[in-house]
């Protein structure tokens, strides 16, 4: 999955969880400042926690070590034949960004509207406070360090209430919260919780300002009546701190509510374990991908038991207690079950092969580079496609002390063509960074599942179109095969088989498969 999409999903999950916690534990108290901090911190954590990497620490934990020791296997690689299906993800991404751009333009227009109002207003001083004088019936509001008001619409007592309210917004920089909430809905517009969180942020700012007005000595009933008088005035701009912002009913309810004790603030510490849980879960998926759960296939098959028995006979009796079989089968003599961080090795002469070591081997560039290498080099055999053969091939191989790959074998077979392709690519791997145990390089055994999958089952469409198929040293090449990788000096001969007659066409199809009807190009390289 696209890393950007994974990041986006994690962010939105965190936003939903933080909002749920807010509604469950904090929505009914009157600790406005603490609530403000929680709301802003929850947004910041939602965007930052996916970027915190504690994988190295998690791998050292006993629980994770148990998972790694139970089944050491690389992440599965799925190989599908090349198709030319419509890429719906492109259209989905495009639709998302287009709508996000629309919301961003809307946000920009609101900022421009505030600038326009400022240019149309006149500077003035009201009760010793620098303000901008509005014209006409416009509701008072503030934005960052500026208070906008039309004194002609309000009595002197009402002006005092309005200034106390709006200066609270100005001095506590509430406009920052408003901007953050707006940008949240621009980026996460597809998540309905982001809109709910925006509403909570706006309401909490009004609760803060209302509380300041009441604390200044203003009678709560007259103040509430004043708010009701201004409720008919519709705000021209949505991103400002509006004196009469709705819903008034909830603001009045909060004014009359009993104040929460300071000890109530302790419950806001719940954000710490919630954040830690998100970080651990976000990083645990990396660990789990290295030790994929295979419980559904843990029962030994006849093939596995036979293979296990053979391996057991090859081990010296004195070394039987160290025997641990790699694969799905289990031997009658298993290694002692321990949750310690000791390495597990398979006896082989005086050079043991380990399953888990302190520092596991690394593919050049890491796991992502490994999967990219496999995806670029594994080719779905055409013959298998024609026969509708698909399934998961599991190969094992050893990373030697010098980083080279050896002892490649199939531990779970699907088909000879798929098996051969999986082994071929593994044998062409570059040298790994070898594993170490107690400071010494050691040999380590890996399992690698490669899933060959056909979309819709058996392929019926000729991927070559009207072009001849290509066989390189007897192996079918895919339609997008890059001929530039073959050096001219390495070619021994090129033979072109043309379907000049129906008889020749039928002969080519019988020898080289149903796609050979348009001809065959045989390329033989020098040995």
Image (tube, grey):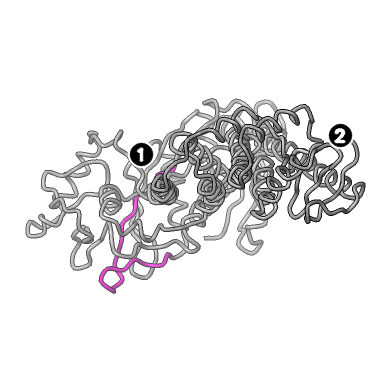
Residue at image location 25% in from the left, 55% down from the top: 62
**Per the image, is 193 magenta?**
no
Residues at marks 1 and 2, CA–CA distance in whole angstroms: 80 Å
State which quadrant residue 379 falls in.
top right
Crowd rating for badge 2 (residues with CA inside 10 Å; few <14, some 14–19, many 20+): few
Q: Is residue 74 visible?
A: no
Mark number, residue 6: none
Residue at image location 60% in from the left, 42% down from the top: 214
Crowd rating for badge 1 (residues with CA inside 10 Å; few <14, some 14–19, many 20+): some
Residue at image location 20% in from the left, 40% down from the top: 306
Magenta-colored span: 432-450
Mark number, residue 137: 2
Tell me residue 8's x, y (percent).
Answer: 58, 44
Tell me residue 394's x, y (percent).
Answer: 37, 43
Question: Which of the marked residues, 1 or 2, is nearer the chain's N terminus?
Answer: 2
Residue 278 is left or right of residue 58, and the answer is right
Residue 271 is left or right of residue 183, and the answer is left
Q: Main secondary structure of the magenta part?
A: strand
Residue on which disc 1 sits: 413
Q: Secondary structure at mark 1?
A: loop
Tell me residue 158's x, y (percent).
Answer: 74, 39
The residue lying toward the viewer, choosing from 512 and 239, is 239
State which quadrant residue 21 falls in.
top left
**Per the image, is 439 magenta?**
yes
In this view, 301 is above or below 117: above
Q: Single out the residue that lies furthest toward the bottom.
A: 439
Quadrant holding the N terminus: top right
The residue lying toward the viewer, choosing from 54 and 440, is 54
Residue 224 is left or right of residue 376, and the answer is right
Tell me residue 389's x, y (percent).
Answer: 46, 31
Q: Is residue 27 visible?
A: yes
Residue at image location 50% in from the left, 62% down from the top: 365
């Amino acid at each position: 999955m696209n890393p950007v999409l994974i990041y986006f999903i994690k962010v939105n999950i965190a936003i939903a969880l933080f909002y749920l916690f807010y509604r469950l534990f904090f929505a009914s108290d009157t600790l406005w400042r603490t609530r403000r901090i929680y709301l802003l911190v929850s947004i910041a954590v939602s965007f930052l926690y996916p970027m915190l990497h504690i994988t190295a620490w998690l791998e050292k934990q006993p629980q994770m070590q148990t998972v790694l020791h139970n089944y050491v296997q690389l992440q599965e690689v799925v190989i599908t034949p090349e198709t030319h299906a419509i890429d719906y993800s492109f259209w989905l991404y495009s639709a998302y960004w287009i709508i996000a751009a629309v919301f961003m333009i809307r946000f920009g227009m609101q900022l421009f509207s505030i600038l326009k109002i400022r240019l149309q207003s006149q500077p003035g001083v009201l009760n010793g406070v620098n303000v901008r004088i509005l014209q006409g019936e416009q509701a008072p509001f503030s934005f960052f360090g500026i208070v906008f008001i039309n004194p002609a619409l309000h009595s002197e007592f009402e002006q005092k209430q309005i200034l106390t309210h709006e200066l609270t917004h100005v001095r506590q920089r509430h406009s920052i919260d408003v901007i953050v909430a707006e940008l949240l809905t621009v980026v996460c517009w597809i998540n309905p919780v982001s809109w709910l969180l925006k509403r909570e942020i706006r309401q909490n700012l009004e609760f803060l300002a209302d509380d300041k007005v009441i604390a200044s000595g203003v009678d709560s009933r007259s103040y509430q009546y004043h708010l009701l008088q201004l409720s008919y005035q519709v705000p021209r701009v949505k991103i400002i701190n509006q004196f009469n912002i709705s819903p008034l009913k909830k603001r009045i309810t909060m004014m009359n509510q009993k104040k929460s004790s300071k000890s109530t603030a302790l419950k806001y510490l719940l954000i710490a374990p919630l954040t830690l849980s998100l970080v651990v879960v976000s990083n645990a998926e990396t660990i789990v991908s290295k030790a994929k759960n295979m419980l559904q296939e843990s029962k030994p098959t006849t093939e596995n038991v036979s293979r296990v028995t053979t391996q057991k006979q090859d081990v010296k009796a004195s070394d039987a207690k160290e025997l641990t079989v790699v694969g799905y089968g289990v031997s009658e003599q298993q290694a002692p079950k321990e949750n310690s961080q000791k390495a597990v090795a398979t006896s082989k002469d005086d050079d043991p092969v380990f399953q888990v070591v302190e520092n596991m081997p690394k593919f050049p560039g890491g796991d992502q580079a490994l999967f990219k290498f496999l995806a670029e080099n594994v080719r779905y055999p055409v013959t298998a496609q024609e026969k509708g053969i698909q399934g998961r091939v599991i190969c094992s191989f050893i990373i030697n002390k010098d980083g080279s790959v050896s002892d490649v074998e199939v531990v779970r077979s699907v088909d000879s063509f798929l098996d051969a392709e999986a082994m071929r690519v593994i044998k062409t791997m570059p040298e790994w960074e070898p594993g170490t145990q107690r400071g010494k390089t050691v040999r380590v055994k890996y399992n690698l599942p490669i899933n060959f999958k056909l979309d819709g089952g058996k392929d019926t469409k000729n991927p070559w179109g009207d072009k001849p198929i290509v066989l390189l040293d007897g192996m079918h090449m895919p339609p997008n095969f890059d001929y530039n990788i073959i050096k001219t000096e390495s070619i021994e001969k090129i033979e072109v088989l043309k379907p000049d007659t129906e008889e020749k066409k039928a002969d080519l199809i019988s020898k080289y498969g149903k796609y050979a009807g348009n001809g065959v190009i045989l390329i033989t390289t020098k040995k």
